[in-house]
Amino acid sequence: MINAQVLAEKFCMGENIYDVDEATWQRAFQLIDSNPDAAFVGDRVHSLWIESGGHLRRKIRDNALILRVLKRALPRYVGPTLTLYRGECQFLFKSNQMGVRLKTWTTWR
């Protein structure tokens, strides 16, 4: 079984390890969040999140923590200011559990 420190390092490199329990994923993201010097391979983390973000979100179960890590891990947008919109399942919206799906944002309302 992989420990949280190794898992955190692998995530930062854009590597996904699928057979990991929820507690280890949660601890790995907490470690990343608490390490201001964490270095990321942004394009690889971006690909990992697009492919497995839903799976990781179900494991980690803490949107605020996920967003803090992704804000640091993903490549920055460079360009003019945009207003973005996205759809969401009504059940998730009403229960304040809106998702973090990077490829579902649009400029079209």
Image (spheres, rainbow, N blue to C red):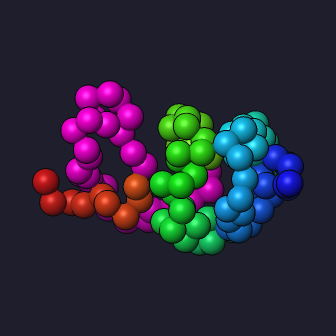
Instruction: Name the foreground residue: 58 vs 15.
Output: 58
Whether 83 is among the magenta residues is yes
Residue farthest to the left?
109
Question: x and y percent of residue 59 in the render?
Answer: 60, 45
Q: Is residue 78 above or below residue 89?
A: below
Relative to 25, 5 lies left or right:
right
Question: x and y percent of residue 96 in the render?
Answer: 35, 29
Q: Quadrant of residue 74?
A: bottom right
Instruction: Name the foreground residue: 20 vs 38.
Output: 20
Whether 106 is among the magenta residues is no
Boundaries of the magenta span: 71-100
Q: Is residue 104 above or below residue 70?
A: below
Q: Is residue 76 above or below residue 31?
A: below
Relative to 97, 35 lies left or right:
right
The residue under the point 55% across, 71% down is 47
Quarter that holds the N terminus = bottom right
The residue under the point 55% across, 37% down is 61
Q: How many marks?
A: 0
Question: x and y percent of residue 55 in the render?
Answer: 53, 55
Quarter that holds the C terminus = bottom left
Q: Quadrant of residue 73?
A: bottom right
Question: x and y percent of residue 25 in the render?
Answer: 70, 46
Instruction: Name the foreground residue: 98 vs 24.
Output: 24
